[in-house]
Amino acid sequence: LQSEVSFDGASGNLKRLYDKAAKMYPQLKRCEARRLSPSKKRGKDIKRLLVSFMYLQSLLQPKSR
């Protein structure tokens, strides 16, 4: 996304990343029933943020021909 010059395999890598995020997005648990330590909670929050961002990015990305 940020590269000024594209490289072989870049579009395939990005598509796989978008596909993976689309599969993971529905599986994200909005609230955890059990208590987690702050470091584990932070890790889960970061994962949720990254997956949500990539899923949103895939929705906003124009479809290739």
Image (spheres, helix red, strand yellow):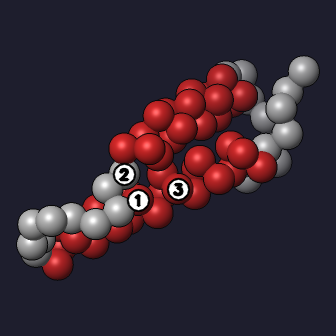
Determine whether the residue tagged by mark 2 lies in a helix, strand or loop: loop
Say which quadrant the C terminus sits in. Answer: top right
Q: Which residue is mark 1?
A: 48
Residue at the extreme bottom: 38
Q: Please tell me the numbered disc located at residue 17.
A: none
Q: Residue at x 56, y 31 (%)?
A: 19
Q: Name which of mark 2 and mark 1 comes first in the sequence.
A: 2
Q: Is residue 1 shown above or below 12? A: below
- Amino acid type for the residue under numbered disc 1: Arg
- Amino acid type for the residue under numbered disc 3: Ser
The Cα–Cα distance between marks 3 and 1, rounded to whole angstroms, is 6 Å
Q: Which residue is mark 3?
A: 52
Q: Is residue 39 shown above or below 9? A: below
Looking at the image, can residue 3 be seen?
A: no
Q: Is residue 44 left or right of residue 5?
A: left
Query: Residue 62 appears at what percent x and percent y?
Result: 85, 39
Mark 2 surroundings within 10 Å by alpha-carbon count, few (fewer than 14), some (14 through 19), many (20 or more): few
Determine whether the residue tagged by mark 3 lies in a helix, strand or loop: helix
Q: Is residue 2 left or right of residue 14?
A: right
Q: Is residue 51 shown above or below 34? A: above
Q: Say whether marks 2 and 1 touch (CB < 8 Å).
A: yes
Which of the pair 17/29 is nearer the observer?
Answer: 29
Q: Is residue 11 left or right of residue 23?
A: right
Determine whether the residue tagged by mark 1 lies in a helix, strand or loop: helix
- Amino acid type for the residue under numbered disc 2: Leu
Looking at the image, can residue 27 be seen?
A: yes
Mark 1 surroundings within 10 Å by alpha-carbon count, few (fewer than 14), some (14 through 19), many (20 or more): some
Query: Residue 64 appears at what percent x and percent y?
Result: 85, 27
Q: Name which of mark 3 and mark 2 comes first in the sequence.
A: 2
Query: Residue 48 appears at what percent x and percent y?
Result: 41, 59
Q: Say whether marks 3 and 2 touch (CB < 8 Å).
A: yes
Q: Which residue is mark 2?
A: 28
